[in-house]
Image (tube, rainbow, N blue to C red):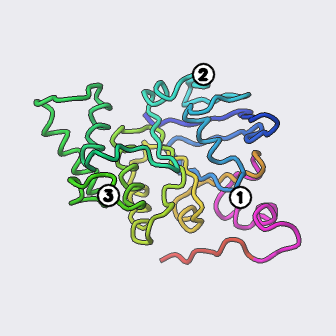
Amino acid sequence: MTVSLTCHGLSRSFGALRAVDGVDLDVAPGGRHALIGPNGAGKSTLMHLVTGALRASDGSVRLGEEDITGMSVVQRARLGISQTMQQASLFPTMTVSDNVLLAVQRRHGRVGPWPRRQAAARRRVDTLLERIGLAGRGDTIEARLSHGERKQLELAVALACEPRLLLLDEPAAGMSPAETARLAEVIEELPAEVTVLFVEHDLDLVFRLATTVTVLHLGRVLLTGSPAAVRASAAVREAYLGTGRDEPLFAQRTEA
């Protein structure tokens, strides 16, 4: 079932620093919602509050109708939250295929040999690797992958968990143009039942994928709206460029 994500008054303090400050965020069921903002705006901290990697100082997080504010990362994952983060969390001594296979097995509640399902699991792995652009790399040890390939593999692992809410923190960081193009295609091809919230500095990618954009600045929501509204906002331009500068911040994409 497609789910929404709702954050209300969400805050996180580190001593005197309020990294996320009273954020209200509504991600519609099946939405493709981007978080952008200058460095230090609180984007990754907000993502960690949604996954449960960080506890909120104030406020609440709801997945659909369920309050998940007090839940652990594992509990939230069981409800269908899957993630990729800035630093990939993979097993460097395992092969590409086995990294994905482990995620497939965990999704079905059993890790280890399961002969009756092994063939089906391997087919699922092969399908995912082809989908994200790593077909033919299944026997490669993870440590031998390039940075961009690791990002692709982490996405395959996240998708293996069959998420209802997929969180992507800078998924295109370090990718080549070809890898970024493939990433965009993968996200565009996700079923409508998967709700996506992503942080990305590649603004061309943001405006290609996002139906809604939230701009964070100094831990607070500066603006939420359509890509066109964000492009046109003087407040957003000032947050990125500073005062006294009025050059275009976002180039209008030319549609093919």
In this rendering, the answer to whether 190 lies above or below 115 is below
* Distance from the alpha carbon under mark 1 to that under mark 3: 33 Å
Q: Which residue is mark 3?
A: 144
- Counting residues from the N terminus, which is met first, the one under dot 1 or under dot 2? 1
Residue 84 horizontal/vertical position (percent):
47, 46
Task: Give the residue at x 44% y 72%.
Answer: 177
- Kindly report which numbered mark, 3 or 2, lies closer to the viewer in this rendering: 3
Give the residue number, with chain letter if any, for mark 2.
Answer: 70
Left or right: residue 236 compared with residue 191: right
Q: N-terminal of the two: label 3 or label 2? A: 2
On the image, the x and y values in percent for residue 164 come to 44, 37
Q: SS class of the residue under badge 3?
A: helix
For the residue marked with disc 1, what is the amino acid? Pro
Q: Which residues are magenta?
A: 221-247
Q: Quadrant of residue 108?
A: top left
Q: Amino acid at mark 2?
A: Gly
Residue 78 to residue 124: above or below: above
Residue furthest out toward the right: 244
Question: Measured from the top left, where is residue 135 in percent x and y?
Answer: 24, 59
Residue 78 to residue 142: above or below: above
Label 3 to label 2: alpha-carbon separation: 38 Å
